[in-house]
Amino acid sequence: MKPSTVKIKETPSRFKHNVPKYKVTRSDACINCGTCANTCPFGVHERLEGHNRVKPPIDYKCIGFECLERNFCCIAKCPRKALTLTYNPMYETLGDYRWTADMITATWIMAETGYPPDRKDLEYNVGNSGGGFDKLRFKFPDNPPEVQRDEISTAIELNRRNDGRANVVISTPVYGGGMSFGSVSLPTMVSKARNASIWNTFTCTGEGGYPEILHPYDNHVITQVATGLFGVREETIQRVRIVEFKYAQGAKPGLGGHLLGEKNTASVARMREAVQGTSLFSPFPFHSVYSIEDHKKHIDWIKEMNPNALVSVKVSTPNDVDMVAVGSFYAGAHIIHIDGGYGGTGAAPDIAKKNIAMPIEYAISKVHNFLVAEGARDAMTLIASGGIRTAHDLAKAICLGADGAVIGTAEMVSLECVRCGNCESGRGCARGIASTDSELADLFNEEWATQRLTNMYHAWNFQLVDILQKFGMKSVKELVGRTDLLEHVDYSK
Ligand code: SF4
Ligand code: SF4
Ligand code: SF4
């Protein structure tokens, strides 16, 4: 059940011209009769009250050629045959095999409306990567036990150690990934935190300090301690309910982190206690950790400093990631956060993203099974990230053994990221999402961005509840480790 703070509100694109799948063109033959505005139920045509002329078509809302079969189709209804419908060749340039144009479009629609699009022409539950989650399908039973939507819980607990620390519960099994001040703008960070508080879940500061503007959302912020220790202070560790050690990132394991000089503006430098304009590097690895004993020392350090906080350990997915997870359990961590190789923004080099870490779908099962074999699974929360693009990916990750997931790119796409991969160049993102340049960062406001994120989380939760209902389950926790409910399209009977 969603928290009462979640309110859905129509939140359209901030751009006049989106990248639509179709072009709806109105010719000079139009007499502005208004028939198209009255007939199209999707709001492509609009005539404002008191205006004689219809507005230019908002074509990204058009459902395309399937509409030609419908009795409301504007193409047939126009008395002057002034409308034409074609594919938009620009659409081909959007996205890639993993994050397809349809998936990006669908995420935009979710962020606008709060619901998954009801369109046959958009395939947004799987991409075209030819592997990973794109090859997995759910095996829904023909006659599942009857369960009503409002009986289904998507809440999960994050502290399963029974160690006297708070049992933090989140209302949906997903939270926002670490994006530092410096890599993204303050409006992006604040809207992520506000959404986390609305959904009773979390967002993470990444490694780059804890801006004061996040203080009202302390209960829903994870502060990160990574190898550069940028912005890490006793005070920031004491503010929060979860502290995360970032040992590595799935998109660039073994490479550490870097923020190029141009994004290191005066405010970023102040937060990171660095010199403005210099490139900042977080080394790999932690030079204070070379053994499991050192790792335990790290975790003890945080626990000592904040007696209430849970400790999360974020690692990439090397071959021995299962050993790392069990080691983290014995070192006292509450959450093992494994980050696979599909994720990452434009800041991660392609050669690293595509070739180093183990794909997340293998790593989840490996870690889950090893924790079970060691008798530690019930005391450890397993969170997966690195390529969770959709609600279907989330549910598949849970079937493979995760308790929940962390997302990054999907949140950025909700804010109208086009996946251009230029996050690190020059002043940063031309859409104002991943930039600390004050001119670019002001391209959207927090109200708009928070609502877009809240809507997108709602659409995901809606789909997750759908999946659970089709399995006849009352809780998302029943889905954990149920690989028997998945099939691989290449090997299914
Ligand atoms: S229905 Fe045709 S003629 Fe009438 S406003 Fe629309 S495009 Fe113009
Ligand atoms: S083709 Fe259908 S969806 Fe597209 S603008 Fe016309 S009525 Fe609307
Ligand atoms: S739109 Fe912005 S956030 Fe998205 S990939 Fe491009 S530069 Fe990065």
Image (cartoon, grey):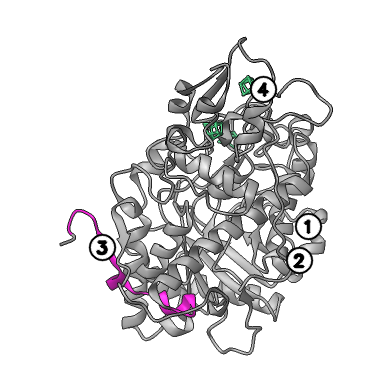
Residue 10 visible in image: yes
Q: Tell which tag, 3 or 2, sits nearer the viewer.
A: 3
Quarter of the rendering occupied by the N terminus? bottom right
Crowd around label 2: few <14 · some 14–19 · many ≥20 (10 Å):
many
User: Do residues under tags 4 and 1 come within 8 Å of each other at their CB atoms?
Assistant: no
User: Do residues under tags 1 and 2 come within 8 Å of each other at their CB atoms?
Assistant: yes
Res. 218 mark: 2
Residue under circle 4?
Answer: 56
Res. 487 mark: 3
Q: How many marks?
A: 4
Quarter of the rendering occupied by the C terminus? bottom left
Crowd around label 1: few <14 · some 14–19 · many ≥20 (10 Å):
some
Q: Is residue 227 above or below residue 119?
A: below
Residue 447, percent from left and from top? 78, 48
Label 3's element?
A: strand
Of labels 3 and 1, earlier in sequence is 1
Of labels 4 and 1, earlier in sequence is 4
Residue 137, percent from left and from top? 31, 59
The residues tagged by marks 4 and 1 sit, at their Cα atoms, a distance apart of 40 Å
Residue at screen point 44% across, 47% down: 124
Asked if residue 481 lies in the magenta stretch, the reply is yes
Q: Which residues are magenta?
A: 473-491
Q: Tell which tag, 4 or 1, sits nearer the viewer.
A: 4
Looking at the rendered structure, the kind of residue marked 4 is Pro
Q: Tell which tag, 3 or 1, sits nearer the viewer.
A: 3
